Amino acid sequence: MAIQFHRPPFHVILPPQATLTNFCFPTDSNTVSSNTPAEGSVPPSVSGVDRDLDMTGRQTSIEAQNLDFYYGDNQVLFDVTLSVPERSVTALIGPSGCGKSTFLRTLNRMNDLIEGTRMRGTILVDGQDINDPAVDVVLLRKHVGMVFQKSTPFPKSIFDNVAYGPRIAGEKNRTYLKDLVESCLKQAALWEEVKDRLNDSAMALSGGQQQRLCIARTLATKPKVILMDEPASALDPASTSRIEDLIGELCAEYTIVIVTHNMQQASRVSHQTAFFFEGKLIEVGRTTNIFTNPDEKQTEDYITGRFG
Ligand SMILES: Nc1ncnc2c1ncn2[C@@H]1O[C@H](COP(=O)(O)OP(=O)(O)O)[C@@H](O)[C@H]1O
Ligand SMILES: [Mg+2]
C-alpha cells in the first residue's frame, strides 16, 4: 500500500482557548467507580505523553468518516466520525458493549474476519481508503498493527515470536533479523529481561512479559499505527504501569489508539479521548478537557461514575 501524507492537518476539536476548569466530581463513594479520576483533578500523565501538546498542523493518521457498522441486522456503530493525529495517543472509553472494540477493529479491517459484518462510511489511513478493493489487507495490517487484551504469543521461542512477521514476509537475513529482534525487544522494554534466553519458549514468560513480547512482535512488522484493545486489563498493577510507560515512549514514533475501560489509564496515557455510548461517538477532545470540562452531560455522567 502506497503511503501518502496529503490529508488536511488534524484540527483540535475543542477550542484551543478552552480552560481546564474543574467541576466537582461527586463525593458519594457509592456512585463513583474506583477507576474514576480523583475529585476535581486528572492524574499526571505518563512520561512522554504531553497532554497539552499542540496538535495543530500534525498530519492526520486515521480519519473515520460517518461510520455505520452492523453484525448481521444489528447496527452497533452509528455515524462515527473521528480523526487521529499521527504520533499521538487516542483513548476510546465508554461502557461495555458500546462499540469500542468494533470501532478499533474497523481500523485494520479485522472485522472482515467475522462473518455477516457490514459497514458504511469511509476510513482513511494516511490518506488511503482502506476499504478500497485495491488495498492489500495483509499490508494494511502490517501498517496498522494490533495488540489484544489477552496476550497471544505463539508457542515458539521468544526470538521466533518477534521474527515471525518479517519471516512470513520473506526476510531470511539472519543478521538483519537478529538486529531487528533486539531493537524491537528494546523498544518494547523487554530486552533486559530476556536477552539471555531468546531461545526459551515465549510461553514461559509472565503475563506482563508476554504482552510486551506481543508489542515487540507488532513493532517488528514496522507499523505506523498500533491499535491496543485493553492491553493491560489482564495484568497486575506493576505490569500495567510498564505498559503505560511504554505507550508514553512509543507515541513519539507511532500513532496509538487504545481501548480502555480504566479511565485513570485513559487520562494518564492519552492526548485525545473519545467517549462512546451505545454505538455513538458522544464526544471527542483533548484528554484534559474530557476529564475536567466535557461538553456533553453524558460524558460528564460517565467519567464521574454515574453509570457504566
Ligand atoms: N462478533 C460479534 N458478533 C455479533 N455481535 C457482536 C460481535 N462482537 C461484538 N458484538 C456486539 O457489538 C456491540 C459492541 O460490542 P464491542 O465492540 O465489543 O463493545 P465494547 O468493546 O465497547 O465492549 C455489542 O452489542 C456486542 O454484543
Ligand atoms: Mg471491547
Image (cartoon, rainbow, N blue to C red):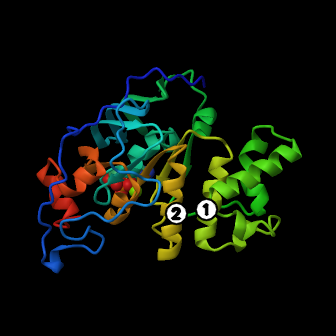
For the point 16% across and 74% down, the residue is: 31
Is residue 279 or residue 194 the one in the foreground? 194
For the point 44% across and 44% down, the residue is: 88
Is residue 194 or residue 202 the one in the foreground? 194
Q: Quadrant of the C terminus?
A: bottom left
Secondary structure under badge 2? helix
Q: Is residue 106 above or below residue 275?
A: above
The image quarter containing residue 85 is: top left
Q: Are marks 2 and 1 in contact (CB under 8 Å)?
A: yes
Q: Residue 65, can we see it?
A: yes
Q: Position of residue 119 (x, y in %)?
A: 38, 34
What type is the residue that disc 1 sits on?
A: Arg
Confirm or reject: label 1 Cβ below 8 Å from ligand 2.
no
Q: Which mark sits nearer the N-terminus, 2 or 1?
A: 1
What type is the residue that disc 2 sits on?
A: Ile
Q: Position of residue 255 (x, y in %)?
A: 49, 42
The 10 Å Cα crowd at callout 2, few under 14, some 14 to 19, many 20 or more, is many
Q: Quadrant of ligand 2?
A: bottom left
Q: Which mark is residue 118?
A: none
Q: Residue 236, can we see it?
A: no
Task: Write down the residue under mark 2.
Answer: 243
Is residue 207 or residue 176 the one in the foreground? 176
Secondary structure under badge 1? helix
Q: Position of residue 142 (x, y in %)?
A: 62, 39
Task: Write down the residue under mark 1.
Answer: 212
For this view, does 16 lie left or right of residue 86? left
What is the spatial separation of the Cα atoms under label 2 and label 1, in whole angstroms? 7 Å
Q: Quadrant of the N terminus?
A: top right
For the point 19% across and 70% down, the residue is: 39
The 10 Å Cα crowd at callout 1, few under 14, some 14 to 19, many 20 or more, is many
For this view, does 195 lie left or right of residue 245? right
Q: Position of residue 95 (x, y in %)?
A: 28, 59
